[in-house]
Amino acid sequence: MTIYNLGSINVDHVYRLHHMPQPGETMASRDYAQGLGGKGANQSVAAARAGAQVVHIGAISAQGEDWVLDRLAEYGVDITHIARLPHVASGHAIILLDAGGENAIILHPGANGRLEAGSVERALEGIGPDDTLLLQNETNLQVEAARIARAAGARVIYSCAPFDIDAAREVLPHVTLLALNEVEAAQLTAASPAGIQVPAMLVTLGADGAEYRDLAAGTVARQPAFPVEVVDTTGAGDCFAGYLAAGLDMGRDLPEAMRHAAAAAAIKVTRAGAGDAIPEAAEVLDFLATHRRD
Ligand SMILES: Nc1ncnc2c1ncn2[C@@H]1O[C@H](COP(=O)(O)OP(=O)(O)O)[C@@H](O)[C@H]1O
Ligand SMILES: [Mg+2]
């Protein structure tokens, strides 16, 4: 039915440099690109491009950045519940890339951390058992939103990223599917060796594919990655999570939803950028028709 996504929206500023600046050094950038990013925005774009009805719940600055909302809307995301907040910067990432491909990133949460409880509650007024809530760790108010969604019987998919064990402990009791990459899964095991209580887990393993662990049934569904030429893996996990959420929401069975998610993520890694590099459903179908792999 509807996927609500309480999530971050970032403007990614990407600078290509000869080398990383040293303290006190000023240098000219060789190249600059600006794109749409933030785990939340990426997941909303993925779910919307997959064909689901997506309502993004978030915030950006009241000053400037109109293009961000235009672009989300263009990708099919409902932007009605994205607040414009005065006196705060939009979330953004300053991404430095040196000639060897190494990166250094400054992330400023800005408006993403200033969501107001009343706005989130209003946005979730109509959520019901056929709906889904997506959450990540780049905004405030995750627990509040997760509680409302679970009380309404909705599916709650939580990406514990960036990893934060305190956030995880608070949100997990309301979660139906926990999504992690390999690094986050290791961080979770280290922080909570006795394991955690959650009905299901998605663990993505980069080029090694993904696993869906149904902890209640004790089963594991494995989805290999599609072999492709990698250009940029930024947002691969978000693309996978958004596509999987959309597939389940649209009534695909788990293996089919996983296959679509893996194909979408494979296409994404062949392209530079985050949200803007996520493919639409037709491209994923074309890809699946030419890349047979189960
Ligand atoms: N090198 C790759 N080749 C093909 N698919 C990939 C590659 N890297 C990532 N993917 C796809 O993207 C998914 C998410 O990637 P992963 O690196 O696990 O997440 P994150 O972006 O959160 O680090 C993988 O499960 C896989 O389907
Ligand atoms: Mg990765």
Image: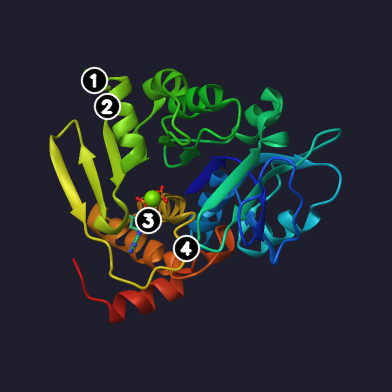
Residue annotated with mark 4? 232
What secondary structure is marked by label 4? loop
Q: Quadrant of the C terminus?
A: bottom left
Q: Is residue 148 left or right of residue 85?
A: left
What amino acid is at disc 3? Gly
Give the camera-side residue of 277 and 177.
277
What x and y, as percent, mark residue 221?
A: 18, 49
Question: Mark 1 and mark 3: span between their CA atoms?
Answer: 32 Å
Between marks 4 and 3 in the image, the one whose residue lies nearer the viewer: 4
Q: Is residue 46 left or right of residue 175?
A: right
Question: Mark 1 and mark 4: span between their CA atoms?
Answer: 33 Å
Question: Mark 4 and mark 2: span between their CA atoms?
Answer: 28 Å
Q: Is residue 202 above or below residue 37?
A: above
Tell me, for residue 247, which label it has, or none: 3
| Total numbered labels | 4
| N-term mark: 1 or 3 | 1
What x and y, as percent, mark residue 89?
A: 78, 39
What amino acid is at disc 1? Pro
| N-term mark: 2 or 3 | 2
What secondary structure is marked by label 2? helix
Tell me, for residue 189, which label it has, or none: 2
What amino acid is at disc 4? Asp
Tell me, for residue 284, which label it has, or none: none
| N-term mark: 1 or 4 | 1
Q: Tag 2: Cα neighbours inside 10 Å, few (<14), some, or many (≥20)?
A: few
Question: Mark 4 and mark 3: span between their CA atoms?
Answer: 24 Å
Residue annotated with mark 1? 193
Report if the CB atoms under discs 1 and 2 are less than 8 Å apart: yes
Q: Is residue 174 above or below residue 15?
A: above
